[in-house]
Amino acid sequence: MVRLGSWSRKYMFHRLRESIEKRLIREGFTPKIVEMEPRIIIYEPKPAAEVLDILKHIFGISSFSPAIYVDFTFKDLIKVIESIVSASSIDSIAIRIHRGDANISSRGLARELSDRISRASGVRIDLERPDLEISIEIRNDKAFIYTYEIPGPSGLPYGVEGCLVSLVSGGMDSAVASVLAMKRGIKIIPLFANLYPYWSRKAVDRALKSFELIYKWVPWDNMKAYIIKDAYKPLLSLKIPANIRCIACKAIMHRYASKLAGRIGCHGIVTGEAVGQVASQTLNNMSALTMLSPLPIYRPVAFMDKLEIIEIGRKMGFSQLNISVGECKLRPDHPSISITDKELSLLRNELERIDDLITRVLDNNLEEIDFPE
C-alpha cells in the first residue's frame, strides 16, 4: 500500500499511479494497481522485496507497506494475525485499526482481536511499547494487514510541474541537480554541450553515463536526452576579453538550452552550479548569467558545499561520475571572478550578434538519444 501526503489532489494522485505502473512494467513486473484514495494498492505476484526497492525511487510516495489482504471478517483477521504472531519471537503486540471507509468501532475491534490473540498465543498487549505493532486498514470490505511502514522519497509525482532542460556536464553536480528537480515534480530533459576537441572524449563518455544514471530515477518508461556537437563554435566567434570566456561559454549553453526548451515546451533550465565553486560561479558572475539567459535558470545545489553534493550523489547512485575528465582547453589563464558592467554589456551585445549562429549549431548538430536505447 502506498500513502500520499495531505497535499495530494486527483491529478497528482493519478500521475503517481501512472509513475508506479510505468516503472514496474519497465522493470519486468505485471502489476495490478487499484486506486483507493488516498491509497494506491499494488497487487504483484513476484517477490515483494523487488517491488519495495523500486518504490524507494519513485517521487511522490510518502510511505509504503507490504500487506496481506483478506476479506473483512473476524475469522480471517484472526487467522492472519495468529500466523504473524507465531512466526515472530515476541512477547507483546499492539493492534491498530484504521477504519478507512468502514463504519466500525476501531477501538472495539482492536480490543476484541487483541483479547483473542492474547488468549491463544500468550503474548501481552502493550499499546505503548510493543515488540510488534500490527496495523489493519479496512477498505471496500477488504482488510489490509501490515506490520511496518517504509519511508518513501516524498516530493511530487514526476512531471506534474512541467519540464525543464537540464544542462548536464556529466559530473555529479548536474546529475544531483537534475534529480532534486525531479523530486519537485519536474520532467527533466538532459542536454550536454560537447566541446570536443577542446575537451576530452572522456567528457562525452561521462555525459552518456550521467544520462543513464539519471534515467534510473525517471519513473516513466522513456526519457529523451540530447547532445550538441561542435557546441564551441559560437564561442570562437565572440569578440570579448579572454578573461570572461568561461562566463561567455556558460551563457551560450544557456541559450542552447533555452532554445531547446522553447521547442519542446519546457519552462526553463536546470544547472548544477554552486556558488563559489569555480570562477564562473561566483555570485556576481551567476547573477550576470541569470540576466543573460533567455529563460529562467533553476539551481537546486546553489548553496551546497561540494562534499554535500558528493554525499547526496553517492546516495543517489552517482559515484561513477565523480571522476576527472581533464581540463577544458578554452579556459583562460586568469578567468574573471567578477564581470564588470562594461564587460557584461559587451557580452550581451556579442551574444545577440551571434544568436543566429547559435541557432544554426543547434539545428545542425543536435543528437537525440532515447532511453531505453
Image: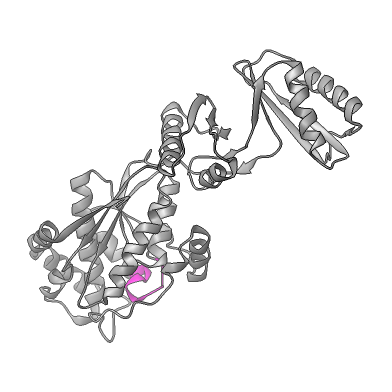
**Is residue 339 visible to us here?**
no
**Image coordinates for residue 172, horizontal then vertical, percent:** 42, 66
Q: Is residue 224 above or below residue 237?
A: above
The residue most toward the bottom is 333
Name the residue at 27% across, 78% down.
328
Place residue 238 in its image quadrant.
bottom left
Q: Which residues are magenta?
A: 274-284
Q: Residue at x 28, y 46 (%)?
A: 267
**Spot occupied by residue 285 in the image (x, y as percentages of width and height):** 31, 69
The image position of residue 210, as x and y in percent, is 36, 62
Residue drawn 47% across and 70% down? 306
Question: Among all residues in the image, which is located at the extreme front?
Answer: 46
Given residues 306 and 2, the one toward you in this image is 2
In this rendering, the answer to whether 46 lies above or below 328 is above
Foreground pick, 9 / 364: 364
**Residue at image x 74%, y 27%?**
80
Give the quarter of the image for residue 145.
top right
Q: Quadrant of the image for the N terminus?
A: top right
Q: How is the image coloured?
A: one colour
Classify residue 337 as left or right of residue 261.
right
Q: Is residue 174 magenta?
A: no
Question: How many numbered discs, if any?
Answer: 0
Q: Is 47 placed left or right of 91 in the picture?
A: left
Would residue 181 be found to the left or right of residue 314 on screen? left
Does the stretch in magenta take in 283?
Answer: yes
Where residue 312 sits in the image (x, y, percent)?
Answer: 51, 61
Q: Is residue 371 above or below residue 123?
A: below
